[in-house]
């Protein structure tokens, strides 16, 4: 074989051998690319942390988009390396708290009211809030033919997702501030508060069984797409238009046994929020893809385009607003005055934020000693 032919052959074989490496390197560039499955695979083959798995709970709601996107894009798994992320979805806060207390999940995304109830129920021995995730994304939407002003709510039937849940407490507090009376347990009074599962609420609205609803996204925008009108965006009634709608919680047992896993998870959550805020359109599409994977059906463009801008994604747990929501539940008669000191442990999050060059966040005096 001539020398030139042998040289050409060797170069061709070398190029062919290098091609998979080049493709792999290109595929790993950036979140939201076609490489997300490859990233998950590479991450899962990485260095295992102190736990084999971390069991994650979250809701298939847009207000839990940090979990939806972080899972879909492999950002959470990438930070966990060889420790496998095992997600489970829940439809309501109480069932997720039960799973945490039963040691069925380790970390969860959940609203403030279930966080408070879960902490109080175990007398502070299990749950800790370790980070924030989202603010906003809650609206009072009504039938515009029956309700044109806030005063028209009197005598009407308004849905909330569940007795004592975050939106239920917020609506009862708003009613109280109007000077109207409602029995918190039965929902009967100057306004009829009808506790209705979010999945059922659009049908209840369409049938006329309810006249409106105080609900999170995407349920609020689903109702608007069916002809309802936004009467109140809850963000507008909070100072600085911010209030916690989703926290990150962990069992104390898992936090104490696997601090490295918790820190890695929080790194993933912070990076997910950063990516969501830098790439809102891609993030919205990613969340919708995950919702489709979970439920079999994606949200329509009309619904998700209206819902997405009302949610702010933040690492800050907005601790002062959690205390305010606890006070609202007490005022409504749904909760005895709770002792919340120790509900937060933000040391791992603040360590992650400091390493990333981001400002630390406050526990509003409710941190673990």
Image (spheres, rainbow, N blue to C red):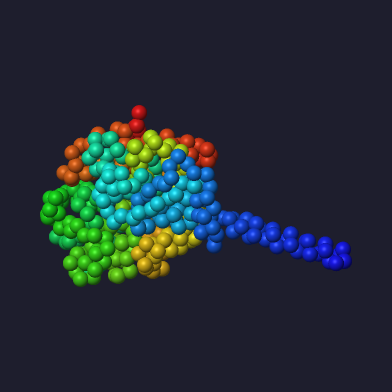
The answer to whether residue 302 is left or right of residue 232 is right
Residue drawn where x is 18% and y is 67% of the image: 209
**Location of residue 214 by image quarter:** bottom left
User: Residue 326: x percent and y percent?
Assistant: 25, 41
Q: Tell which residue pokes out farthest to the front in this image.
A: 1
Regarding residue 241, the answer to whether it shows in the image is no
Residue drawn where x is 33% and y is 40% of the image: 251
Which image quarter holds the N terminus?
A: bottom right
Residue drawn where x is 38% and y is 35% of the image: 256
Viewer-closest of 232 and 223: 223
User: Residue 66: x percent and y percent?
Assistant: 42, 52
**Location of residue 309 by image quarter:** bottom left
Regarding residue 50, the answer to whether it shows in the image is yes
Relative height, residue 198 to residue 47 (above, below): below
Viewer-closest of 208 and 4: 4
Residue drawn where x is 21% and y is 44% of the image: 329
């Amino acid at each position: 074989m001539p020398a030139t032919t042998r040289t050409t052959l060797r170069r061709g074989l070398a190029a062919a051998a290098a091609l998979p490496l080049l493709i792999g390197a290109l595929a790993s560039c950036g979140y939201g690319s076609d490489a997300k499955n490859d990233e998950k695979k590479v991450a899962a083959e990485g260095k295992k942390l102190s736990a084999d798995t971390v069991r994650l709970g979250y809701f298939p709601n847009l207000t839990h988009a940090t979990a939806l996107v972080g899972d879909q894009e492999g950002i959470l798994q990438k930070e966990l390396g060889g420790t496998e992320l095992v997600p489970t979805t829940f439809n309501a806060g109480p069932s997720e708290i039960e799973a945490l207390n039963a040691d069925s999940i380790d970390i969860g995304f959940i609203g403030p009211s279930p966080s408070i109830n879960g902490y109080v129920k175990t007398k502070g021995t299990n749950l800790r809030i370790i980070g924030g995730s989202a603010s906003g994304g809650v609206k009072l939407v009504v039938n515009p033919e029956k309700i044109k002003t806030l005063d028209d709510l009197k005598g009407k039937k308004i849905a909330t997702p569940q007795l004592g849940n975050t939106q239920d407490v917020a609506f009862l507090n708003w009613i109280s501030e109007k000077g109207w009376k409602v029995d918190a347990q039965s929902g009967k009074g100057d306004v009829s508060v009808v506790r209705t599962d979010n999945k059922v609420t659009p049908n209840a609205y369409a049938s006329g069984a309810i006249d409106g609803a105080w609900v999170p996204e995407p349920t609020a925008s689903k109702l608007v797409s069916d002809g309802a009108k936004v009467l109140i965006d809850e963000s507008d009634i909070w100072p600085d238009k911010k209030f916690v709608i989703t926290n990150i919680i962990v069992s104390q047992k898992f936090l104490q046994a696997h601090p490295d896993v918790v820190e890695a998870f929080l790194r993933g959550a912070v990076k997910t929020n950063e990516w969501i805020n830098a790439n809102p359109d891609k993030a919205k599409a990613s969340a919708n893809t995950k919702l489709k994977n979970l439920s079999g059906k994606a949200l329509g463009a009309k619904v998700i385009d209206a819902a997405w801008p009302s949610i702010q994604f933040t690492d800050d747990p907005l601790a002062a607003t959690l205390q305010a929501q606890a006070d609202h539940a007490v005022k409504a008669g749904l909760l005895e005055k709770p002792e919340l000191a120790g509900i937060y442990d933000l040391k791992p999050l603040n360590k992650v934020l400091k390493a990333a060059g981001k400002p630390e966040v406050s526990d509003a005096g409710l941190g673990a000693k």
